[in-house]
Image (cartoon, helix red, strand yellow):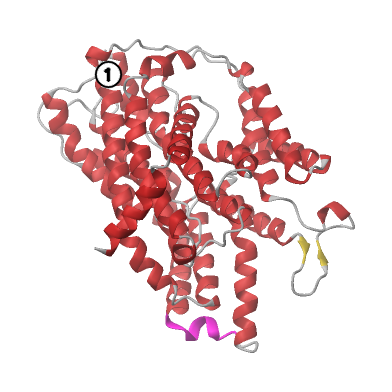
Amino acid sequence: MEVFEHLALGFSVALTLQNLAYAFIGCLLGTLIGILPGLGPTATIAILLPSTFALDPTTALIMLAGIYYGAAYGGSTTSILVNLPGEISSVVTVLDGYQMARKGRAGPALSAAAIGSFVAGCFGTVVIAAFAVPLTELAFKFGPAEYFSLIMLGLIGSIILASGSVLKALGMIVLGLLLGMMGTDVNSGMQRYSFGISELSNGIDFVVIAMGLFGYGEIMANLSQNDQKREIFKVKLSSLYPSRKDWKLMTPAIFRGTLIGSLLGILPGGGAVLSSFASYTTEKKIKMKPGEVPFGEGNIRGVAGPESANNSGSQTAFIPLLTLGLPPNSVMALMVGAMIIHNIQPGPQVMTSNPDLFWGLIASMWIGNAILIVLNLPLIGAWVRLLTLPYRWLFPAIVLFCAIGAYSLSNSTWDIWMLGWFGVIGYVFNRLEMEAAPLLLALILGPMMEENLRRALLLSRGDWSVFVSRPISAGLLVAAAGLLLMVVLPAIRKRRQNAFVEE
């Protein structure tokens, strides 16, 4: 009954006119970002962070959350109609969704994606509401040693679950930790890695780094590629609905994908991307029914399963953020940054100190999923027209908006220069196939990790055994060591390398 009382509070907050308006704006922007190739929720949230300064913290987080799970919805449209994923988590949707469109079945494919995403999103929100209270109570048992070990586990998990080379991911983590240490040491007052430059005495704002790596970096990467001729299929509303046979095939796939995403979304580095790939792999291993279309040739299960998984993964990624204050992926790291900007310390105390924000955000996810089902079916024709817009018309506006946002942080042109340099660095990372998401995670978690390390050693009077003498901390460190050992095994390493590759 206590959960229902909390949800009643949440809906009273989420259903205010202002929060409804910003939930709609977030869902609309997220859908747009998912549909337009070359942009993603990480870049968009990084770009929009400065614009949330004037908003109420709850309103700001509701809008940013809508952008995140809205992008998971919208990414399926370009995957199905244009054979070009608008968002990374929609990569596997291309394999069967586009083939369905080529066979004149774009409508059922789009409906399967939207319905699966709606069901999965609602279920993911139920999971958050159900587990938020017990997980928060568990989090109160965490001391500095436990938080240090948990952050260590999260960083190692992000290395293993990141696509590409383990060594490159490790390098990104180390670079992120070093950038997080730049500035003034709060304990000694000494300057670290400032190189005598006064502007670096407080470090580099993570918003500037995020906008540079994911905003300018993505723009440079997209402009370096030749324009592709896109074949776009016209869809009539009368042909949107799946047949009875489609329902029989897609319904179990939706529930399987929802469960997979709900579990994997919580993992560090997991979220929507890992969930969608795991769901597609699972569907391919399930025995096909007589007369069912092969995978890769337009099987509706190959659309419904991954789209359900990526949306439920997007929702449950909020669990470690809201209960422990630790982000499982780069987008959640930006959400932590948004909370810090509004003077809210992420962690289990948010439920007691800011119950309106905590439960209002959860309740807004149900409202957001209802908004998205409306946006993704009747407005498909409008989204299709957007796909014909040349990218060269979009990037100048994005560049200008990023520059204004960077300048507004401290009214300094230094931040604009930093934005440009990190844009170049982001482009270099893209060319070298070095995923920048682990860097952003380490940048956010690094200072928290250092603070808890020092606090634990201070309380134990310099005794390092505190990290292994406390049961929870020891268990987390054992899990972290296990992850490192796993990636060394040849079989695990081979599976990891092939995890994001589909034939």
* Image quadrant in which you'd find residue 79: top left
Residue type pointed to by label 1: Gly
Q: Nearer the viewer, residue 27 or 81?
A: 27
84, above or below 471, in the image: above
In x, y percent, where is residue 20?
42, 37
Query: Considering only vertical position in the picture, is 178 above or below 313?
Result: below
Asked whether 397 falls inside the magenta stretch, the response is: no
From the image, which quarter does the C terminus lie in? top left
Total labels drawn:
1
Q: Is residue 503 visible?
A: no
Highlighted range, magenta: 464-471
Disc 1 crowd, CA 10 A, few/some/many (<14, 14-19, 20+): many
Q: Residue at x 76, y 56 (%)?
A: 203
Quadrant location of the N terminus in the rendered image: bottom left
Identify the residue at horizontal 42%, vertical 42% (top origin). 16
Q: Residue furthest right?
A: 196
Q: Main secondary structure of the magenta part?
A: helix
Q: Is residue 462 visible?
A: yes
Q: Quick one: SS at disc 1? A: helix
Q: Position of residue 486 (x, y in %)?
A: 43, 62
Task: Say left or right for 349 vs 184.
Answer: left
Establish if 354 lies above or below 215: below
- Rendered location of residue 466, percent (x, y): 54, 85
User: Which residue sits at x=27%, y=57%?
Assistant: 4
Closer to us: 407 or 436: 407
From the viewer's perspective, is 294 left or right of 86? left
**Residue where numbered disc 1 is placed:** 107
Decide if residue 8 is on the left or right side of residue 499.
left
Q: Residue at x 71, y 56 (%)?
A: 179
The answer to whether 85 is drawn above or below residue 309 in the figure is above
Q: Position of residue 412 (x, y in %)?
A: 82, 43
